[in-house]
Image (cartoon, helix red, strand yellow):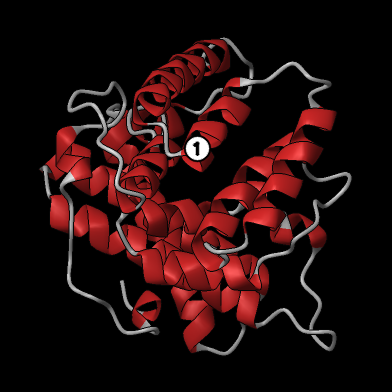
Amino acid sequence: MRHDPLELAQENYTFQLRRALEAVEDGDATTETLATIAFSYRVLGICALLRHLDAEQFAKLLRKSGLARLQLLRQATPENPVPPRLLAISHDVGFCAALAAGDLNTATRIAERSPDTYVDGWEHEEDFLFFHFLQQLLHAPDDTAARHRTMERWTQVVEGEPTVYFTVCRTLLDADEAAFSMALEELIETRKESLRKYRQQLDFDQELDATEGKVYINGLALVRMAQSRGLTVPERLELIPRQARVAACEVLPEDAWRRP
């Protein structure tokens, strides 16, 4: 019996992905199916990096995660409403996956189609504002007024007590390289503390800890965002391996998510 959580994660999410893709092929796919595909590709990308040191496959699978999310958003129409929990951008794994892979094109198209209000009951407003701000930087880079409105609302939400998420986005807005590096390292420490608490919970999942717990995809997405704005980022960052930072792959066709 295998006990390696990373190996089990690769096996289990490969199975989930194949089953979901079969549903797509059979015409039985739902937006829930697409959400499963996006998450499976993201986890499998991390497996490729950690188990096989395959940076190209890591980037390729993260790109596919983003393309699956884009397809989900394209299916969201008044005639085909998507469950609110699937629209909540703070639960969208594909946006940061695409951004972390350096696929700014797909990340921007996801941002353009994403909700611009938070889904009450399914996400916290501050979580929404964090991702909404990153999406604004991509799809409306010249709309400084909109970004300032977002930061003003964020200030109200945190009642004038800036969180690390607020601070890191503020440094991106200001293009302050030194402050961004400090805020990013603080954010990584916050992530590590969250993981320590998660490992004590009853719902702790060893497979997710072996993947998402070892590579901070949202942190890598912030690195990519900072670099796209001309900022230099520290070479060594915990939870963001160098192989992940240099990962790249060719541009994929929009339907690449349909094939494992």
Task: Please name the amino acid that badge 1 sits on.
Answer: Asp
**Disc 1 marks which residue?**
174
Q: Residue at x 79, y 24 (%)?
A: 158
Q: Position of 69 compared to 201: left or right?
A: left
The percent coordinates of residue 37 (x first, y second) are: 48, 64
Residue 134 showing in the rendered view: yes
Residue 128 showing in the rendered view: no
Question: Compared with residue 213, is residue 138 higher up or lower down, i.e. above or below?
Answer: below
The percent coordinates of residue 212 (x first, y second) are: 41, 35
Q: Residue at x 49, y 68 (%)?
A: 108
| The one of 3 and 57 positioned closer to us in this rendering | 57
| SS label for mark 1 | helix
Q: Position of 139 compared to 148: left or right?
A: left
The percent coordinates of residue 230 (x first, y second) are: 29, 47
Labels in figure, total = 1
Q: Position of 2 compared to 12: left or right?
A: left
Position of the C terminus, as image quadrant, is bottom left
Disc 1 crowd rating (10 Å Cα; few below 14, some 14-19, many 20+) is few
Q: Quadrant of residue 2 in the image?
A: top left
The percent coordinates of residue 142 (x first, y second) are: 55, 64
